[in-house]
Image (spheres, rainbow, N blue to C red):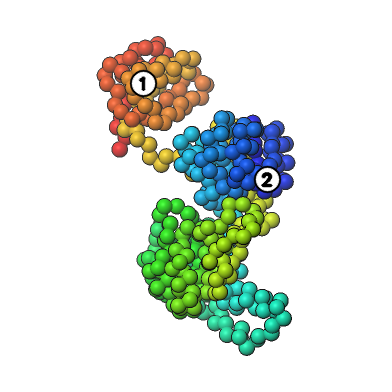
Amino acid sequence: MKVLIADKFEKSGTDALQQMGVQVVNQPEAGEAGIPGAIADHDPDVLIVRGTKVRAAAFERAHRLSLVIRAGAGFDNIDAAAASSRGISVATCPGKNAIAVAEIAWGLILACDRRIADQTADLRAGKWNKKEYSKARGLYGRTLGVIGLGQIGREVVSRARAFGMDVIAWSRSLTDHDAHALGVTRSPDTITIAREADAVSVNVAANDNTKGLINAAFFDAMKPGAIFVNTSRGSVVDEAAMLKAVKAKGIRCGLDVFASEPGTPTAEGWASEAARAAGVTGTHHIGASTDQAQQAIADEVVRIIRVFRETGDPPNVINRCERTPATRLLVVRHLNRPGVLAHVVGAIGKANINIEDMENVIFQGAEAACARIKLDAEPGADVMKAISSGSPHILSVDLAAIE
């Protein structure tokens, strides 16, 4: 197996892969523009990236590539649709950076409340202005709103208790029971959080459901002078509406992510109105960039590759179809002999019926097996007869509808 590492990656992870007998090609500076060529030159089975973007052009140059691993939790830097169109799995490392991201979220909350970045800039410029900065509201006894209660959101909540804050939270899957267990108040919607919270932390995944989730209506509902922190993805927030609220209502924003952030580790001349705005404290999308988080992620990447090599079925894949077009389940019990499945698949193919999913379970002793085959159409009586009678090793054939 050959693995191409096209981004910064822990040496311990590279060493572990080599110890497994994996051939490693390390090109951490390849960048978005260089990845397609690197894939064409090295023809890897697995591609590992961190924040570098992997576009459709990269997959068009691939031949053996069957797995892309994002060394992190999100995957919006990878064209998952293009990967899916070529049967390439995309896997992530969920939860391994949760503590690191929660820590930077709290760093931004504190920085916004005490205006730490502005103070540092003044001090470096030789300006002493204690009068201006002696006006922080403080966090104790105030309300934190948390949007998104995955592992990162839960880590943010646990740290709110140390600051003596009440927490109101919203997540599509949050129930009253779970809210009680977490010690938070469940909000019916995001607007209620905007209306009631003194500080808001956004911790959702980037997908079609969350694009523009934090919009003008949300910022209109926020308290004047409240704190807004986003450590998820830039696509989640309407930056124009956010900047309007900064100017009109004195909202203080802490952002680790931006809507138009570069897809490379460095970029000269990057222009972002949000990053430059007064009232915004920013960091370089480095929420997961701690030694602890990167080691945990490297360990998970190695585990994914180990499982993939041993079973052909990588964990944490995000681009598998949740529900296939299958309408029928064909169950074939058979003796474990060569040619049986070839016969069954051949009969299905001759009937112009597509196999959407298939598994073949071998029983103890390896004498018999059971194939469960999901089909996109119902095989007629002639097809069922051809399957059952075409091999002496078939024990039974059954068909059921998939609801």
| Residue 210 placement: quadrant | bottom left
Instruction: Tell which residue pokes out farthest to the bottom in this image.
Output: 131
Could you tell me how far apart the alpha carbons at marks 2 and 1 are, in whole angstroms?
46 Å
Quarter residue 348 falls in: top left
Can residue 219 be seen by looking at this rendering? yes
Mark 2 vs mark 1, foreground winner is: 2
SS under mark 1: helix
Q: Amino acid at mark 2?
A: Pro
Q: Residue 314, position in %: x, y?
A: 55, 38
**Residue 262 in the figure: left or right of residue 202:** right
SS class, disc 2: loop
State the image coordinates of residue 400 (x, y, percent, origin top left).
Answer: 30, 30
Q: Which residue is drawn at the image coordinates 30% and 38% (left, top)?
A: 403
Q: Identify the residue at image location x=60%, y=73%.
A: 111
Say which quarter of the image contains residue 269.
Answer: bottom right
Rendered location of residue 107, percent (x, y): 61, 69
Q: Which residue is mark 1?
A: 348
